[in-house]
Image (cartoon, rainbow, N blue to C red):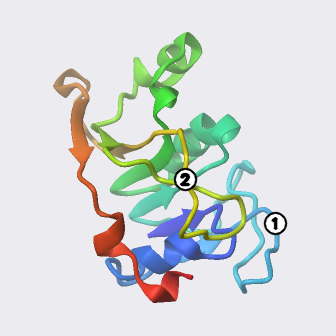
Amino acid sequence: LCKPTINRGYLAKGLADHFDTVLGSDVHDYGAGFPQHDFLFPGKPLYHPDWVITNPPFRLAQEFVERALEVVSVGVAVIVRSVWAEGVGRYDNLFKTRPPEWILQHVERVPMVKGRYDAEASTATSYSWFVWMQGMPLERGTRFGWIPPARKRLFSVGDL
């Protein structure tokens, strides 16, 4: 599993509970010991993972998906604002020819605070996971599902 945009490693820590190996990098050095690498830079990627799972910068999310689909052997999953499903340009340049296999909507709001974790944070923004699988037939179409409330069940004191 590869986690570009690893930042300080918060999401990677949670992913490590479910994957044997989590490799990460970021274009910036946040002092957490991860390699500094621009995932979007053309040429040879830093890793050739089975999966790329990430929360990309919103304005670069499409580029992250396109690059990830070039380097993975199994799939790509990005968490983005739910409104990311909208947009003629994104439809024409990505969804029409490479639709996600799944769009998974969080039913509870997921507060994201830049650069830190805040257990008391709240948000009016909704988030979804968009998931692509290599080799998925275009005619199968995108399936939609819900992610039930899980924050309290998945939270651990070590996340702070």
Q: Secondary structure at mark 1?
A: loop
Q: Position of residue 4 (x, y in %)?
A: 61, 62
- The amino acid on which the numbered mark 2 sits, given as a three-letter code, is Ser
Q: Residue furthest left?
A: 140
Q: Is residue 37 left or right of residue 11?
A: right
Is residue 69 at all visible to an observer of this figure?
Answer: no
The residue located at (61%, 70%) in the rendering is 117
Q: Position of residue 39 (x, y in %)?
A: 68, 56
Quarter holding residue 10 = bottom right
- The image quadrant where one finds the N terminus is bottom left
Q: Position of residue 17 (x, y in %)?
A: 36, 82
The residue located at (54%, 39%) in the rendering is 66
Task: List the residue tagged with mark 2.
Answer: 122
Image vertical order of residue 111 relative to residue 2, above or below: above
Task: List the residue tagged with mark 1.
Answer: 28
Q: Nearer the viewer, residue 99 or 85?
A: 85
